Amino acid sequence: MFAHIRAVLFDLDGTLIDSAPDLGAAADKMRTDRGLPALPLEHYRPMAGAGARGMLDCAFGMPPEHPDFSAFKEEFFANYEACLTERTQVFHGVDDLIQRLRGHGLAWGVVTNKHSRFTNPLTQAMPLFASAQTVVSGDTTPHAKPHPAPLLEAATRLDLPPQQCLYVGDDERDIQAGHAAGMPTVAATYGYLGAQADIRRWGAHAEINTPLALLQLLRLT
């Protein structure tokens, strides 16, 4: 389906790794530290892709305009930094997918809105990312997704034109960024979509419900 692709770029949380357990734990610790009852992981999972904003909304119903949001966000960040990889795992099939992509000579990398404060130690701790040719974080460029700048930065680092890079993500912002950068896009429906997501409205060029389904789209099976 996708011709002339020479690299595959991926979103991180909800696409390559299931970080919801650690993100949820960081937010839930804030509840229990305040004497509030713990909430189950499934309460947090649908909003894991929205970072601190999503986790604080789940834990406290706190919007970004709340006067305490900034302080709560920093507390959440500190909690999350302390447990980055305690429960986080690579999604089933991702290791095999990366191995197959590399076996066919395709480059690969990560473009995430997660700040380098978290991205760097996390990717350095997980063996999967040792072979990534580039990792672009949310603060690598002046703009985060859905702005195309991070994706264009990744393409530049790989010395490839954007149209030869495929971008895979589990959020509408990923698809918007891919379109803006001139990259073909794939929506990962196994990620943190949430109940309200209407994937068809995103306009992705294709969808996959497992990581390994990407191989069929690239005709690498």
Image: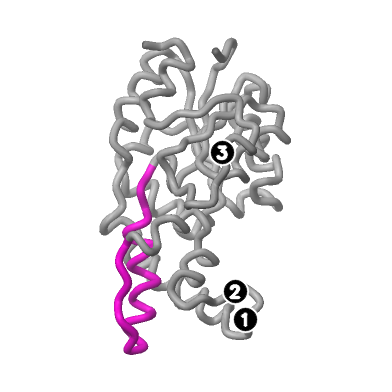
Q: Are marks 2 and 1 in contact (CB under 8 Å)?
A: yes
Considering the image in quadrants, where does the N terminus appear?
Answer: top right
Q: Amino acid at mark 2?
A: Pro
Q: Please state which amino acid type lies under the numbered disc 1.
A: His
The residue stretch that appears in magenta:
17-41
Which of marks 2 and 3 precedes in the sequence?
A: 2
Secondary structure under the numbered disc 3 in the rendered image: helix
Q: Left of 113 or right of it: where is 210? A: left
Q: For mark 3, what is the residue?
A: 199
Q: Of the two numbered discs 1 and 3 on the same chain, state the one appearing first in sequence.
A: 1
Residue 158 versus residue 44: which sits nearer the camera? Answer: 44
Q: CA distance from mark 1 to mark 3?
A: 30 Å
Disc 2 is placed on an element classified as loop
Identity of the residue drawn at 67% across and 35% down: 152
Please tell me whether residue 98 is drawn above or below residue 38 in the rendered image: above
Q: Is residue 199 left or right of residue 108?
A: right
Q: Which mark is residue 63?
A: 2
142 or 198, which is in the foreground?
198
Residue 18 magenta-drawn?
A: yes
Residue drawn where x is 65% and y is 31% of the image:
156
- Name which residue lies at 70% across and 42% down: 149
Q: Is residue 173 above or below residue 9?
A: below
> Which residue position holds label 1?
66
Residue 16 image position (x, y, % from top left) = 40, 40
Kindly identify the amino acid type of the residue bearing the numbered disc 3: Ile
